[in-house]
Amino acid sequence: MEKLSDDEVGQIMRRVRSRSDRRACAQVCSQWHRVEGLTRNSLRILDPQLMHQFLPHFRNLLSIEAQMEVCDRDLECMAENCRSLQVLNLYLSKWRRVMDLEFLSTYQDFKPLGDDGVVAIANNCKDLQHVSLRWRQGIGDIAVSALARSCSLLVYLDLGHCKRITDRSLEAVSHLECLEVLILRNCNLITDWGLSYLANGATNKRIKRLDLCECDQLTDSGAVLLQQLSALQVLNLAECGPNVTDVGGTGIAGVTTLQSLNLAWLINVSDVSIITIAHHCVDMEELNLSGCELVTGTGLRAFAGHKKLRALTLSSCSNIHSDDVDATASSCLALHYLCLDRGLRPWMPEECLERLQSRKIEIEWL
């Protein structure tokens, strides 16, 4: 029997779905092991200490996920061996952050990921489209600027909880013509100046999702600028602080493409904003008004009869009453999720609850 070519081994490999079977084949066939390294396009790294040994065998990877502590040297290894990368997910999950405390205490000389590693990735992996650096708190403007400068195909960028990110990063990002999703959750050094770069840059006709939750230095001036993002569909302004008022709220109504809006805990946003948003944002599907103390039933009822509203969150809304909820929810025929304050539960008539449940609306009490 003649020796199989790499192409033939690759075709066989594509028909073997079981991971354990593939692993067993690799252990007894060196050609299989080599071809798998050449044909595999995604990899989840569980132990970064072994990465430097096995990564040179996987030079055609398109996607890497590593949700544990890594250092600059680890990313430099990725950059050297995986130049075709399109997806890099380094989201450090909450569970991993807790578990890695023990790891960091064992290796006192270990320095968590900083700008240098990301710069190496940016310089070598120019086809990147999806990058998540959430909770990598050593990441700063140098890293983001390098990504924006070298990776012009970026569509998705998650910088959530990267506390060193400033307006300088947004200035760099504003030149990305393909960027559709930008997550800046809890990047609380960002100001209105940063939003002005997004509003006036190449991003203003492309961004569809923008998460600014907990960016508490923002004011009405920045919120008003968001109406220049002509493709924006999903906007999160939750917990952006007391300096976002009805001036900013009514400005947001100018984003007529909005489908999902989170205004939770904007304590100075009132009915004026909600009525204006209801009038202009006719494609709204999801709305979160949790903790908006100045919003009353008058504002909520402005959404009565909205044809596309599917999800409505109203926890900690002390000035919204059961009849307001009934009038609005009953007339929004697309509604399937309703989140209400548990303090409202005793005041909701049973016939109202039965009517909503008969429409298979999921009701959650918080």
Image (spheres, rainbow, N blue to C red):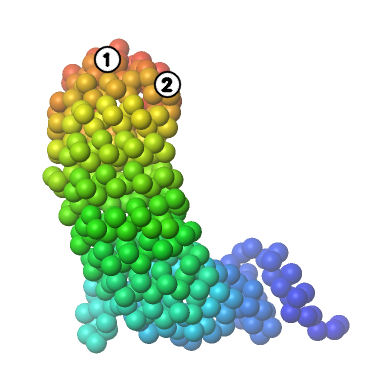
- Quadrant position of residue 227: top left
Mark yes or no: residue 265 visible.
Answer: no
Which residue does the image show at 38% across and 58% down from the upper left? 201
Query: Where's residue 258, x and y in %?
Result: 39, 39
| Residue 28 against residue 278 in the figure, above or below | below
Is label 2 in contact with label 1 (beta carbons under 8 Å)?
no
Closest to the camera, between mark 2 and mark 1, is: 2
| Residue 179 against residue 149 in the figure, above or below | above
Left or right, residue 139 beside residue 178: left
Residue carrying label 2: 333
Which residue does the image show at 36% across and 72% down from the upper left? 145
Residue carrying label 1: 350
Query: Where's residue 140, x and y in %?
Result: 28, 72
At numbered mark 2, what does the secondary structure look like: helix, strand or loop?
Answer: loop
| Residue 85 against residue 167 in the figure, above or below | below
Q: Earlier in the sequence, mark 2 or mark 1?
A: 2
Mark 1 belongs to which amino acid? Answer: Glu
Left or right, residue 271 beside residue 22: left
Query: Where's residue 188, x and y in %?
Result: 20, 59
Left or right, residue 210 beside residue 60: left
- Quadrant position of residue 189: bottom left
Characterize the local packing of mark 2: few (<14), some (14-19) or many (20 or more) Cα atoms within 10 angstroms. Answer: some
Which residue does the image show at 35% across and 17% down from the upper left? 330
Task: Locate the C terminus by quadrant.
Answer: top left
Which residue does the image show at 56% across and 74% down from the upper left? 84
Mark 2 belongs to which amino acid? Answer: Leu
**Residue at the extreme front:** 200
